Amino acid sequence: MIGHDALSPWENFYIIVGSSAGALTGLQFVVMALVAATESASDTGEVDAFGTPTIVHFCVVLLVSAILSMPWPEISQAAIVVGICGAFGVGYSLIVIRRARRTENYKPEMEDWIWHCVLPLIAYVTLLVSAASLPFNHVPAFFGIAAFALLVLFIGIHNAWDAATYMTVKSLQKRIKERTPTA
């Protein structure tokens, strides 16, 4: 199947999603600036497990949006490249799970495991399966890829917000503790 014919109806979707992913990457830089401004006991283990993956997720959504906005001669060519992104994402998700298990200063709670490990893994498996089925049944495959993109965007938004609120609360608690006289 000619790639352009199949991808054309999705053009606006990928423009919106890709632009959002690019803008949200900037949001994560703001979150990391907040982390740097606090004097918390974070180290690279926590950043590698909970900060960097958010940037990676946003960038993969931007990349997939760009890939599917290209004028592919054949849909199978786009499927191969998107499938590579999905395989990368599955592998990276497994690395993040290992990093989250090894953090020392922060022990993840159930919500952290769901949003930072389980949901991204599900999203990347969805991307991989959708890419594999794209040449054979492109309509459901495109909806699977769209579900991946939206899920990963919402994961990134949640995780950036979670990090920002965590650091804000932690900073406020430290200030209150410093002002409270000790007996």
Image (cartoon, rainbow, N blue to C red):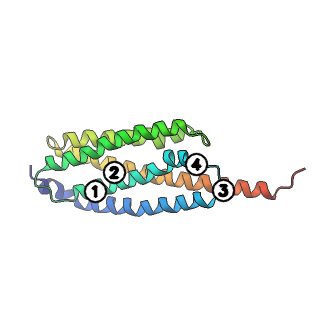
Label 1 to label 2: alpha-carbon separation: 8 Å
Q: Which mark is residue 65?
A: 1
Q: Position of residue 100 (x, y in %)?
A: 51, 39
Q: Is residue 131 found left or right of 25 in the rendered image?
A: left
Return the disc, 3 or 2, that comes first in the chain's sequence.
3
Return the disc, 3 or 1, that comes first in the chain's sequence.
3
Residue in the picture at 40% in, 51% down: 56
- According to the picture, the residue beneath numbered tag 2 turns out to be 149
Q: Position of residue 60 (x, y in %)?
A: 34, 52
- According to the picture, the residue beneath numbered tag 3 turns out to be 39
Residue in the picture at 47% in, 36% down: 98
Return the disc, 2 or 4, that comes first in the chain's sequence.
4
Q: Where is residue 89 in the image (x, y as percent from the top left)?
A: 35, 43
- According to the picture, the residue beneath numbered tag 4 turns out to be 43
Name the mark nearer the viewer: 2 or 4.
4
Q: Position of residue 173 (x, y in %)?
A: 71, 53
Helix, strand or loop for disc 4: loop
Label 3 to label 4: alpha-carbon separation: 11 Å
